Image (cartoon, grey):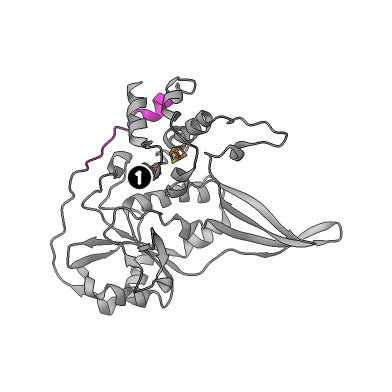
Amino acid sequence: MQILNKNKLKAALNKLAETADVFVPAARGENSGFYSWKTFDQEKDELMLEALNVYLPPKNVLFPQTERMYSFQEEGSGVVIKESFEDSSPTVIFGARACDVAAIDCFDDVFLTRGYEDTFYKSRRDNTTIIANACYQPGPNCFCASMGVNPTDPATADIIIRDTGEDYVWEARTEKGTALTQKIADLLENKEVKIPELQAFSKNVEYDGVAAKLKGMFEHPIWDKLSEACQTCGICTYVCPSCYCFDIQVKSFGEEGYRFRCYDSCMYREYSQMAGGHNPREDAKERFRNRFLHKLEFFQERYGKPLCVGCGRCIVACPAGISITEIIKEIKEA
Ligand code: SF4
Ligand code: SF4
């Protein structure tokens, strides 16, 4: 098998960064997330390839928090589009965990299927190679296996690395992965090493049957109880690797300007505010219910899987201590 000794990891990242923007999990100040290796401060930043999980997922790489879409100019009585800003620069996500890879699969479903292609997402996705870091020791808030994710074998990754202690087993899975592997071929060795065994999850939840059960629970009083503590701060949607709601806004300067999109959150009142003032999700309970119905019922009905990949980030981040696994359990018991 091919292995990358950990002593050669930085050399491999430097090599990959010669031809692509490489995003790595890292701690930076009080934050952690996926940051460009080009901006990595060797003194202050800390690589977090062993962490489960970094605070922010890699969704910003394929779906930036703010993204300029196109510029326009008024001409006579009309408007012309001057430039479209699809980003096709080569990119690598290095060390994504299986849950985050599964979340990217959800993004692919939303932005690339059902006869609709989001060209901004597609351009980034086509030019991104994903190197997944297999998990063998689930963290205290991980429950990906309960949500149908295989932590040791994320099927759609281009390359899988497996941490054996001193080395990473390096396994190219796709043409993109093979092409990238060739760039660091001189740093890889052939050696037989023992692959770790997957340890038991401390957090488990029974999701089977939840989507079907939720169909009849729209008016159920359980939503009053479940949403009681929610402050509608939206941090759960911000840290979630599979939340993709966005808003499109315009910035104009006289006769020209540009449109951009930015993250939005279904937990905010303005998200569902309509022209004329009506809001179908005026109350926190209605917004809370919508979030969990979308995650656990609607997405399952449309794409055949839940929109939760069990990363546990929202459980860690929620200031009100709300846990999606507890919500699933309460729904099962209701
Ligand atoms: S993080 Fe918690 S309090 Fe904030 S919107 Fe989400 S569920 Fe509500
Ligand atoms: S809902 Fe929570 S546990 Fe599920 S994928 Fe999103 S952040 Fe992770």
Q: Does the residue labelled 1 lie within 8 Å of ligand 2?
A: no
Q: Ligand 2: which quarter?
A: top left
**Residue 169, x across and y down, in percent:** 22, 65
Asked if residue 327 shows in the view, the reply is yes
Up-down relation of residue 229 to residue 129 (above or below)? above
Up-down relation of residue 1 to residue 57 (above or below)? below
Instruction: Tell whether position 211 is magenta.
Output: yes
**In this picture, which residue range is highlighted in magenta?**
201-215
> What residue is shown at x 28% (from left), y 76% (from top)?
185
Asked if residue 215 shows in the view, the reply is no
**Residue 191, x across and y down, in percent:** 15, 71
Q: In which quarter of the image is the C terminus?
A: top left
Compared across the picture, whether 118 is left or right of 252 comes to left
Q: Quadrant of the N terminus?
A: bottom left
Q: Which of 150 and 227 is in front in this view?
A: 227
The total number of labels drawn is 1
Secondary structure at numbered mark 1? helix
Q: Nearer the viewer, residue 198 or 171?
A: 198
When asked about the image quadrant of residue 160, the answer is bottom left
Q: Which of 175 and 284 is in front in this view?
A: 284
Compared across the picture, whether 100 is left or right of 215 comes to left
When asked about the image quadrant of residue 167, the answer is bottom left
Compared across the picture, whether 4 is left or right of 102 comes to left
Q: Nearer the viewer, residue 282 or 4?
A: 282
When asked about the image quadrant of residue 70, the answer is bottom right
Up-down relation of residue 37 to residue 211 (above or below)? below
Q: Mark 1 points at which residue?
A: 316
The secondary structure that most of the magenta stretch takes on is loop
- Tag 1: residue type? Val
> What residue is shown at x 31% (from left), y 45% (from top)?
149
Instruction: Tell whether position 239 is magenta.
Output: no
